[in-house]
Amino acid sequence: MTKSQAEQFILSLTNVGRKEYLANRKDCAIYLKRLQFFLDLLGNPEKKIPHYIHVTGTSGKGSVCLMLESILRADGKKVGVLTSPHASIIQERWAVDGKLMSGKDFAEVVTEIKPKFDEYIRKSPYDMISYYETMTAIALYYFAKKKVEWAVLEVGCGGRYDATNVIPRKDVAVITNIGLDHTDLLGDTKEKIAYEKAGIIKSGCSVFTGIKEKRLLKIIKKECKKTGARFEISNSKFLISNKISPPAMLCKALRAGNIQYPISHKHQLTNAQLCFSIAKHLQIPHKTIIAGIKRVKLPLRMEIVSRKPLIILDGAHNPDKMRTTVATLKHKNIKASKQHYNITTLQHYNNIHLIVGFSDNKDIRTMIRQLSTLRPTSVACTRQTQNPFRKAANPREIADQFKRLLPTCKIEMFLDPKDALGWSLKQNRANGAILATGSIFLSGEIKNLFIKQSSTLSS
């Protein structure tokens, strides 16, 4: 089986009828039961991994996973990391020792587990596992096969019934923050969403969070008391709050000028501080923590792929993420990745050109309002074309909303992101910067037009 054949087989399983995630609130436990049944057929790879860190949150969870992976690896640990979704190629979801799963390994894994799908439909009392549940099963099987010591898992959506919560134990459960996203699945208030995300808290684990709202912390602490988990953050001298700054050593190291963007910006400093606290709890030395954070790569988090012209790719897809994106641009302090460019700043650029696309189930109106405060010179409204699971918002509807807020701005719509990029480049005649945002899939698609897909997570 080739890589493309393996991917096609996994995709083909989606045409088998199933109960979709959180579509029926009455029997949500079935999502974990059916995945557990499949893992049993695989020989329970989830039980062969000694240590787990489980990360959820509305925003920042992917960044936190990659930072923790880099810190653990700097400490000499063999680490597997699962993140989602993939922006460009399917193997972006899984990495071991800082290297993405190869196409060869992916094909080999799917070839090995393929017979188990037939066994599953013959023996299972449940319906077919979902695409995302399959991605999680592949991660656990692959990590066990590679004999990782630590697995860092990013929750896909929510937490309580997310496929990643099938793991039998965890050393650390992390809830980065709570915002209003996936409200159709998780609930329409922060309290309801916090309850779903708190579901990753299990007996014996230590709980860390960046949440500051007392009403939400109450929900987290209640789950800790219920499960017997340890709420570590409240008594830590590395407590995250508005009054206490990050540890002096962390700030000094991150501001030394030799670290890749975007760690030096406020929202990523918050993520780094949370990782610092977790790593200290795991008794990892200060210098090792700093070394791990300094070498982490955060793809599509304000990632610069071109300096002349300046082109920034960002995967913000909800108001919380977009808020930090807009704030970072307004601060005019963009550091280019040392892998490609030297330090630069937006202060040298006269205008901003946007390339924007969204999934249709997002709070598009709010994000457009946020982006409009940048007063862009032009806006190219487009869509992602590579992910069959995410319905894209209509570029015409996006354009209409921008026109109402920015009546004098030059706004155009395109069905192909490549055409949107070409148009934006033509508009960018006066030393401007181009920002592509609104969807990780759109940003990933544009990224492929510039650089060859990297096979590593960190330098």
Image (cartoon, rainbow, N blue to C red):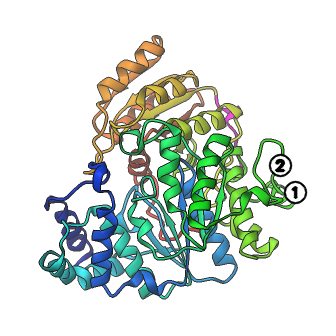
Q: Nearer the viewer, residue 443 or 186?
A: 186
Q: Is residue 214 above or below residue 206?
A: above
CB within 8 Å, label 1 to label 2: yes
- Location of mark 2 (residue): 245
Q: Is residue 69 above or below residue 267?
A: below
- x and y percent of residue 139 in the render? 40, 74
- Give the Cα separation between the discs numbered 1 and 2: 8 Å
Q: Nearer the viewer, residue 316 or 306?
A: 316
Where 385 falls versus 454 (above or below)?
Answer: above
Magenta segment boundaries in residue numbering:
342-349
> Residue 350's x, y, as percent?
63, 26
Horizontal arrangement in the rendering, residue 35 relative to residue 232 (left or right):
left
Quadrant of the frame with the C terminus: bottom right
Q: Secondary structure at mark 2?
A: loop
Three-letter residue code for mark 1: Ala
Identify which residue is drawn at 52% across, 28% down: 371
Give the residue pinned by disc 1. Answer: 248
Q: Is the residue marked by circle 2 packed among few (<14), some (14-19), or many (20+) residues within 10 Å?
A: some
Location of residue 53 in the rendering, given as x and y in whole percent from the top left corner: 57, 70
Q: How far from the left and from the top, in percent, is residue 223?
A: 57, 57
Indicate yes or no whether the magenta region holds residue 343.
yes
Residue drawn at 32 percent across, 24 percent down: 397
Q: Type of residue at label 2?
A: Ser
Q: Quadrant of residue 67?
A: bottom right
